[in-house]
Image: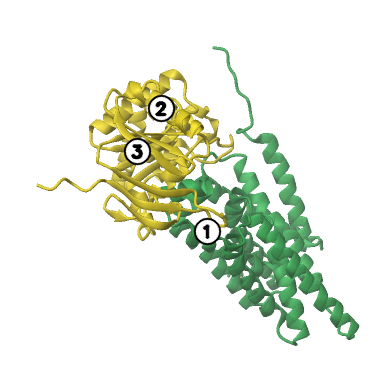
Amino acid sequence: MLEFLIQNNIVCHAVEAMLFASIACAILSVIITQVQISSIGFTMAHAAFAGAAVGMFLSLNPTVCSIVAGIGVAFLIGPLSDKARLSPDTSLGLLFGICMAVAIFFIAYMQTLGRGFSTMGLLFGDVISLYREEIYLLVVICIVAVAFVLVLYKEITAIIFNKRIAESVGIRVKPVYYAMLFMIALTVSLCLPIIGGLLLYVWLVIPAAIALQFCNRLSSMFVVAPAVAAVVSVSGALIGLEYSLPVAPLTAIIFSVVFIVAVILSPRRRVTFRKT
Amino acid sequence: MTPPDPIIRLEDVYTAYEGADRPTLTDVSLAIEKGEFVVIGGPNGAGKTTLLETINGMLPITHGAATVCGQDVRKNGVQVRCRVGYLLQSFAFDPLTPFTVEEVVLMGRFGTIGLFRKPKKGDYEAVQDALSLLGIEDLAARPIGKLSGGQQQKVLMAQNLARNPEVLLLDEPFSNLDMFAREEINRLLADLVGNGMTVLIVSHAFDDLPERPVRVVVMQEGTIVVNRECSPGEVEQVVRNAGREALHA
């Protein structure tokens, strides 16, 4: 897609992957931070781990299995919170523990059977060994994330503002909320192979945290967060590949620096008083 | 000519929270006509908020029948909530909440606008009208988190008025308001009731009620113990007497 700008195929694929993954994650980061369910990143990462481990054990494609496991857990989060009367964060913690246990069980069991299983790819991501089809999938998920927010914008904003108030004004809160959780979980499981489970958290939290330093309106946050994430992620990919540095951790460090600068410069925290 | 159906009719209603071992509302029957001003009193935990949330369908009815604005609450809770305003009890928003006053008030119309549809010119006009009614037009572009508790309460009131509800349920609406704002809101409520809106208000502050006949409903342990009309000046006494009788029963 961006070959007309970047001749080197590997660099081009890496930039495309980082661009689309960062936009999708950053849009959803606004929802994640405002609804306060940031632990969804860990949970989905470990669901993918568990899926990949089970896939390896059954000699199936680990990437496909990790996505299937992610989608399965995505379906469970909302109903589990409601049926067990737990907060979404507690449900996520519960699912995180279960997924982790399943993943470790199968990894350990395969080691005892003499079948190695490398978790490095899922932990830290691998931006330079992606297939074209995987990048197309990221384009699709990016478009779906944007469309999801545009189509359900009213409902999403009301739920973010306050779930009970949203319900009292006549919004069907439960289906929209479940759809939000599912969309986040799906995006996370598709972005895992690029960024990795450990660093994905940065993409799911920091873009919105940076946007919040400058935006009074949620609508502005939905524009600023993906814009910042795209610039930082593409810069991270270009610098990392140019100087042979690990791309995902480098991008996470750049994000952190931008966040610190944003907090220092934030007009929302400034106290202005002029005696006239 | 037959009299019109009550705008709110509860018949032998029981409501229970999920997992509770006994109902929160027990055997509640109530009929309220269009344009009535109803004050709901009673001690803490008597079921006043539960009654409001049963009327607008936010809590499940386990037994009995409820009709509000001609709709069966058990089947059409969402449709009922589009026609019934509900000001929830005490709220405080974080200073960094990324919503302006105008956006918050517009949310009041989201249910009536419907899924997959965008607000239209009429919706924004209704927001401006609601802001004017509360006298907070100048706050429209301000972030809600940066306002005082009283101002936030007015914004939520405007949010409810923006959808022109037929019934307005208010849970402790005066809790964050100073005496001037209270008088202002009471005048507004009197106008709304005068124009045919039905208002149900849960409150512990009975002074400054609008000068018009009031129906007092007193609740004790999830059931209605008093339901009668009186003048605004008598409300406090009626609630006190009901409390004393319950104490000696």
- Chain letter of the residue carrying label 2: B
**Of marks 3 and 2, which one's residue comes earlier in the chain?**
2
Q: Which residue is more in the foreground, A248 or B101?
A: B101
3D distance between C-alphas at marks 1 and 3: 26 Å
Q: Residues within 10 Å of mark 2 (few under 14, many from 20)?
A: few
Q: Give how far across and how far down residue B232 sits, in percent.
A: 32, 24
Above or below, comparing residue A86 to residue A3 in the picture: above
Is any atom of residue A5 visible in this view?
no
Q: Which chain is yellow?
A: B
Q: Is residue A53 above or below residue B125?
A: below
Residue A200, picture quadrant: bottom right
| Residues marked 1 and 3 touching at CB (< 8 Å) | no
| Residue A201: % across, % down | 71, 57
Element type at marker 1?
helix
Instruction: Identify the residue position indicated by label 2 in the image.
Output: B138
Q: Quick check: can you spot residue A57?
A: yes
> For the residue marked with disc 2, what is the amino acid?
Asp
How far across and down, in percent of the image, does residue B57 sit? 40, 52
Give the number of the disc on residue B161.
3
* Distance of label 3 from label 2 (alpha carbons): 17 Å
Q: Nearer the viewer, residue B115 or A174?
A: A174
**Label 1 lies in what chain?**
A
Which chain's colour is green?
A
Single out the mark in the foreground, 1 or 2.
Answer: 1
Query: Are the residues flagged by discs 1 and 2 in contact, CB closer than 8 Å?
Result: no
Residue corresponding to mark 1: A177
Residue B11 appears left or right of A273: left
Residue drawn at x 54%, y 70% is: A140
**Frontmost residue, B88 versus B29:** B29
Quadrant of residue A76 in the image? bottom right
Whether A129 is drawn above or below A208: the answer is below
